[in-house]
Amino acid sequence: MTQDAATVATAAMDRATFAQALRVTLDEQLTLDHPIFKELFTPERNWLLLKIISLEGYQITKFFLEYIETLHYRCPLSAHKRRLLFNMFEEETGRFSKTKNHVELMEDFIRAQGISDEERDVWTPSDATLELIHYRLDNCHGEKTYHIGAAAVMIASEGQSLETRAGDARHTILANCYGLTEQDTLFFSVHQKEDVAHVAEGISLVADVCDTFEMQQEAIHAVRHTCKLFWNMYESAAQKYYSLRDAGEPAAALA
Ligand SMILES: [Fe+2]
């Protein structure tokens, strides 16, 4: 390879092309395509499955503030640092959305299913859920992995709320299928609204901090990999559901 060819092969993409590549990568990995959602969103309410998915989801919700706090604390660019502060403030207080702390919103959703706080707190997360948590924590905290943590959290994770099925957002489908109220599903509606801006900000942040070809490739990989870890979390929830159902646990306890 000539030196010119080597330079071309490793040249960083321009900012707009890279931003577009991040967006396309996110859009390619829709976790609502997982077959377990067909089982969840059926006219026969499947409370057991909803409980498993909610309690696994709760494990990751509890860590979200730490990711944002870390990305804010370590952010090298002042404009992005300020935006992360707003994001963090909303997570902690719910002030912008006129709701409340986002972990508390998730707790409301879990209580609306008739699950006690005790049952919620003794739930053991699956290995797949723990892997998703630790991948993001490690990269947000890692010395040379800020861009990977930012891509994993601000693009792939915030991007999970944007998905719709046949034009309806997840909270609308949940409310319709399970007879839950707008209040019960505020966690999802708040995120669906806010996360459009958060993903755009995530793409902008990652595009600004990645100044080499290698960093760009690592960030794109982080988006793809994080979505894959979300997929694995749903897969493990599905496996847990099938084994509990086959062991005789009633699937429609509250229906
Ligand atoms: Fe949140």
Image (cartoon, helix red, strand yellow):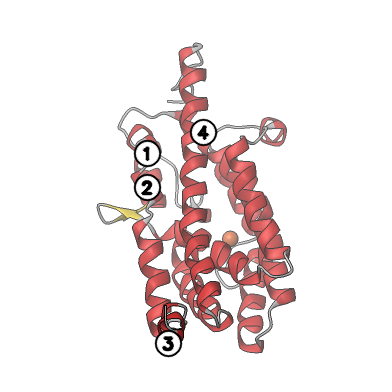
- Element marked by disc 2: helix
Q: Which residue is mark 3?
A: 4
Q: Which residue is mark 1?
A: 37
Q: Which residue is mark 4?
A: 236
Q: Of residues 55 and 96, which is closer to you in this image?
A: 55
Is residue 140 something that shows in the picture?
yes
Q: Of residues 233 and 82, which is closer to you in this image?
A: 233
Q: CA distance from mark 4 to mark 2?
A: 15 Å
Disc nearer the start of the sequence (1/3): 3
Q: Of residues 176 and 35, which is closer to you in this image?
A: 35
- Whether pointer 1 and pointer 2 mark residues with C-beta atoms closer than 8 Å, the reply is yes
Q: Quadrant of the C terminus?
A: top left
> Within the image, what quadrant is residue 66 found in?
bottom right
The amino acid type, in three-letter code, at marker 1 is: Phe
Disc nearer the start of the sequence (4/1): 1
- Whether pointer 1 and pointer 3 mark residues with C-beta atoms closer than 8 Å, the reply is no
Nearer mark to the viewer, of 1 and 3: 3
- Element marked by disc 3: helix
The image shows residue 229 at horizontal and vertical percentages of 52, 47
The image shows residue 142 at horizontal and vertical percentages of 72, 64
Residue at image location 34% in from the left, 43% down from the top: 176
Q: Does the numbered disc 4 mark a residue whose Cβ is under 8 Å from ligand 1?
A: no
Q: Quadrant of the N terminus?
A: bottom left
Residue at image location 70% in from the left, 57% down from the top: 138
> Within the image, what quadrant is residue 175 found in?
top left
Q: CA distance from mark 4 to mark 1?
A: 13 Å
Disc nearer the start of the sequence (3/4): 3
Q: Which residue is mark 2?
A: 32
